[in-house]
Image (cartoon, helix red, strand yellow):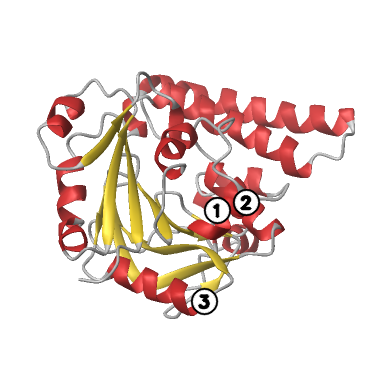
Amino acid sequence: MGPMRLTVVVLNYNAHRFLPACLASLAEDRASGLARVVVVDNDSGDGSVDWLRSQDVESILLPGNHGFSAGNNAALERVETDYAMLLNPDTEVRPGALAALVDFMDRTPRCGVAGPRLVDPDGARQLSCRSFPSYKTALFNRYSILTRLFPENRHSREYLLSTREATQPMEVDWVSGAALFVRTAAMREVGLLDERFFMYAEDVDWCYRFKQADWEVWYQPGARVMHHIGGSSRTLPLRTMLERHRSMYYFYKKHYSRGVPILDLMIFSGVLLRTLVHLPGAMRGGRT
């Protein structure tokens, strides 16, 4: 058994129905000594806490829902292994995936962040690596009407990288926080997740900051993780929708704002309008 190389942080919030399968998929890597697993629970009310207390797994039980960034940071700030991984509880890691990511990071010394290939339960590829958002993203994001009506339009394809069906690792702008691998030394240089993002866009922000610090972000399709999209967020559709749009505007203000009040007002108005458009669906419990 070699030295432990990786700490996997599983942030749970009311995802008890997925959590046992997620942890079971990590059992071999725990047993081999490759990975330490830490479950952080954001004060779930679905039986997750009682179940975790009955399991042989390290856990951090937070007194309240602190959100994605703060919840993960509670474990990340204690990491002592070479690498750390953010992993959603609604995922299952395929055999060999963690070893492949460790090996890739070992061979790519300027890679600060890497993401595996995320797939649906039926094996279909999820669009888990993308370009950084631009002003066009409001019109051509994954759930926009234009993307749904015209999925092959150039602007949506450029943002979602939907035509880049990689079979080999490729450098990208950002990868999904559902399964995000990070070099601990780089994380200490760049800093932890920005806790002003309660949920959504914190992964984009983190990758943006790594890039600003001259670290690379890579997509490694040779490592596979199955992902049930929205395992936790579906329990709070209205809160999810509101936080998604709040994060959009905060990301803009943090990285793109030029300090021109009229332009900031225009962007804010656009985000607000998009929020109002999605509000009825969120109140009905639909996808946002």
Position of the N terminus, as image quadrant, is bottom left
Query: Which quadrant of the figure has residue 59?
Result: top left
* Secondary structure type for disc 2: helix
**Residue under the image location 52 percent in, 25 percent down:** 242
Query: Which quadrant of the figure has residue 61?
Result: top left
Are dots 2 and 3 in contact, CB under 8 Å? no
- Callout 1 amino acid: Met
For residue 89, side relative to residue 283 (left or right): left
How many other residues sit within 10 Å of disc 3, few (<14), some (14-19) or many (≥20)?
few
Residue indicated by mark 2: 190
Alpha carbons under labels 2 and 3: distance apart: 18 Å
Query: Residue 259 placed where, x, y %?
Result: 87, 34
Foreground residue among 91 and 139: 91
Query: Residue 76 placed where, x, y %?
Result: 44, 44
Going from N to C along the chain, the mark reached first, 3 or 1, is 3
* Secondary structure type for disc 1: helix
Residue indicated by mark 1: 187
Are dots 1 and 2 in contact, CB under 8 Å? yes
- Callout 2 amino acid: Val
Residue indicated by mark 3: 108
For residue 14, side relative to residue 73 (left or right): left
Foreground residue among 259 and 230: 259
Alpha carbons under labels 1 and 2: distance apart: 5 Å
Foreground residue among 264 and 29: 29
Indicate whether 214 appears above or below 203: below
- Callout 3 amino acid: Thr
How many other residues sit within 10 Å of disc 2, few (<14), some (14-19) or many (≥20)?
some
Query: Residue 216 placed where, x, y %?
Result: 60, 67
* Secondary structure type for disc 3: loop
For residue 213, side relative to residue 146 (left or right): right
